[in-house]
Amino acid sequence: MARTIDTIKTELKQAFMQDTTLQEKYGFAANADFDNVFSKVSLESIILYIVAASIWTLERLFDTHTAEVTDYIATMKPHSLRWYVEKAKAFMYGEPVLPELISGSDVYDTTDMTDEQIAQAKIVTFAACTENNATLYLKVAKAGPAPLTADEKAAFIAYLHEIKDAGVRIDVISEQGDYLKLDMVIYYDPLLINANGESKADGTKVVEQAIKDYIENIPFNGEFRKNELEDAIQAVNGVVMVEFNAAYHSETGAEDTYDEVVPYCKPASGYFKFNNADLSDVTYQPYAN
């Protein structure tokens, strides 16, 4: 960004007064102030103003050139998967102010919006984009995570059609979290944990909490990995050993749709919901030496 003429002139004045050759020729002290030595209408002051104005003009030209190049690149360059993720999170929806895209651009006009209104309108918290068979698959979710409503999804798709590259096919996915079923045996120290997986110190369901923490901390569109969950449970104080028999994954939760996880899987919706994790087949056995 171009500096002001006054800012540039001030820097020139300082350089002028610090020059030892000029100090000797003019006879001013090294710590003297330019404005105390030369008047505003002096030849020296006028020359420094002309130089400062010239530098300012050049910096403005550089700014203009940079803006033109940036706009050209934005117009001509095919966009990356990361760009679609960023634009998904930039989507704005809702009241009291409904922002509109600036004509011919992929940016909203937020002139009449407060920071709070802008934050409230940006409803997409999570997004991930992948490509397969010439189609982009864009998974999105609100905070929670939670899927977009029907109206929100329709508006989001219309938004994408306005900003996407011509000829690009996009499939928007915004669904409830995927389902998991876990089949394992937890061998526990009966001095520390009871038969329900609860800590004898405070009654906390420490094993269930470890499973919940692992599932909820999987990155959006990240993988569920059996070995990582086993390690998380194994780290619980009082758990001696984990016998992981199987894990099953389903997009819908219907009984006939579960497939065994070998040894990892990625959620179709982009995330798992802990309340979908069926722990009925997680059993506890006291560990005996």
Image (tube, grey):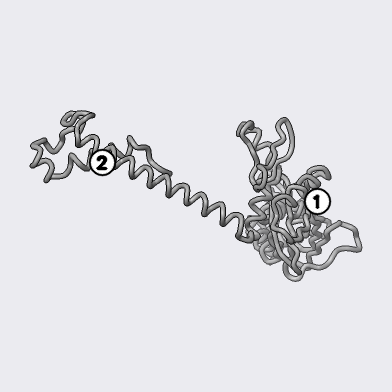
Residue 187 occupies quadrant: bottom right
Residue 219 seen in render: yes
At a point 76% along the width and 51% down the height, the residue shown is: 274
At a point 25% along the width and 41% down the height, the residue shown is: 12
Expressed as whole percent of the image width and height from the top left, the position of residue 97 reads 70, 32
Q: Label 2: which residue? A: 12
Give the secondary structure at mark 1: loop
Amino acid beneath label 1: Gln
Residue 210 seen in render: no
Number of numbered markers = 2
In the image, 106 versus 221, the foreground residue is 106
At a point 77% along the width and 63% down the height, the residue shown is: 184
At a point 74% along the width and 61% down the height, the residue shown is: 167
Expressed as whole percent of the image width and height from the top left, the position of residue 217 reads 66, 53
Q: Label 1: which residue? A: 176
In the image, 144 versus 235, the foreground residue is 144
Q: Does residue 155 lie above or below 251 as drawn?
A: above
Q: Seen from this angle, which residue lies furthest bottom? A: 262
Residue 79 appears left or right of 160: left
Give the secondary structure at mark 2: helix
Q: Does residue 117 lie above or below 241 as drawn?
A: above
In the image, 92 versus 10, the foreground residue is 10
Amino acid beneath label 2: Leu
- Mark 2 residue crowding within 10 angstroms, few (<14) / some (14–19) / many (20+): some
Q: Nearer the viewer, mark 1 or mark 2?
A: 2
